[in-house]
Image: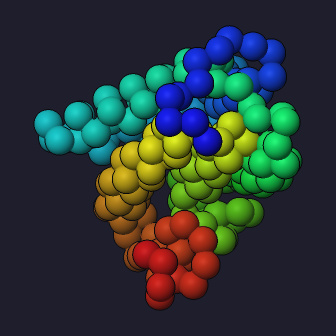
Amino acid sequence: MDWVPAFEPGVWNAWLFMIIYPLQWLAVIILPDIGARTSHAPEIINSRKDRIMSWLTQGIWIGATLYSIFLPLRTDTPWVWVGLAIFLAGLAVLVAATFAVAAAPADKPFTSGIYRFTRHPMYLSMLTVYLAVSVASLSWLFALITLATFFLQRHQAMKEENQCTRIFGREYEEYMRRTSRWLGNRSRLT
């Protein structure tokens, strides 16, 4: 791991991992049912702090995606394989979450499929992929981006949970009682 962040355009760079998010965003546009079910953002951005957090989240995502074009994967180390394994786990979570959203009734909260194990699988997948990029590229800068993304997504997740509680009431409260925000034991990892 170098102290000076790498900045070299190339084919074998971190964009190979990060490309899944622009592709997923495109799928949301092309498949209107998924887009309609995931578009609660305007409803939960109701304060100056929320707007700032939303802009920071979007800015970091765009910045991380652009930086990934110039961030070489460390193909000369075994860390690239560890990063690839982590990436595949994140990709599996993203695909499972996308299918769960597509199959969910429009008037119900997402609680089936991978949503039985985590209340925010899309956020979890992004954190997992960011971690994969950090490991596969041995980049401390991308690790900091991952950490910042965690805190921003945690804020967003809590806002979404409040909104879902207002919309779905007891049904969502019960879902929150039995399902962890991220992964693992509900009582320990809220």
In the figure, residue 119 lies in which quadrant? bottom right
Residue at the outermost bottom position? 187
Which residue occupies 31% across, 29% down? Answer: 55
The count of marks equals: 0
Residue 138 vs 14, above or below: the answer is: below
Which residue occupies 28% across, 39% down? Answer: 53
In the figure, residue 32 lies in which quadrant? top right
Q: Quadrant of the C terminus?
A: bottom left
User: In screen coordinates, is 190 left or right of 6?
Assistant: left
In this orientation, which residue lies closer to the viewer: 109 or 65?
A: 65
Residue at the outermost top position? 9
What is the x, y in percent for residue 26?
Answer: 66, 21
What is the x, y in percent for residue 78?
Answer: 84, 48
Q: Quadrant of the N terminus?
A: top right
Q: Can residue 108 be seen by looking at this rendering?
A: no
Q: Can residue 104 be seen by looking at this rendering?
A: yes
In this orientation, which residue lies closer to the viewer: 43 or 12?
A: 12
What is the x, y in percent for residue 68?
Answer: 62, 24
In this orientation, which residue lies closer to the viewer: 103 or 179?
A: 179
Which residue occupies 65% across, 15% down? Answer: 8
What is the x, y in percent for residue 93?
Answer: 73, 53
Colour logic:
rainbow
Residue 152 vs 118, above or below: the answer is: above
User: In screen coordinates, is 48 left or right of 69?
Assistant: left
Which residue occupies 73% across, 42% down? Answer: 136
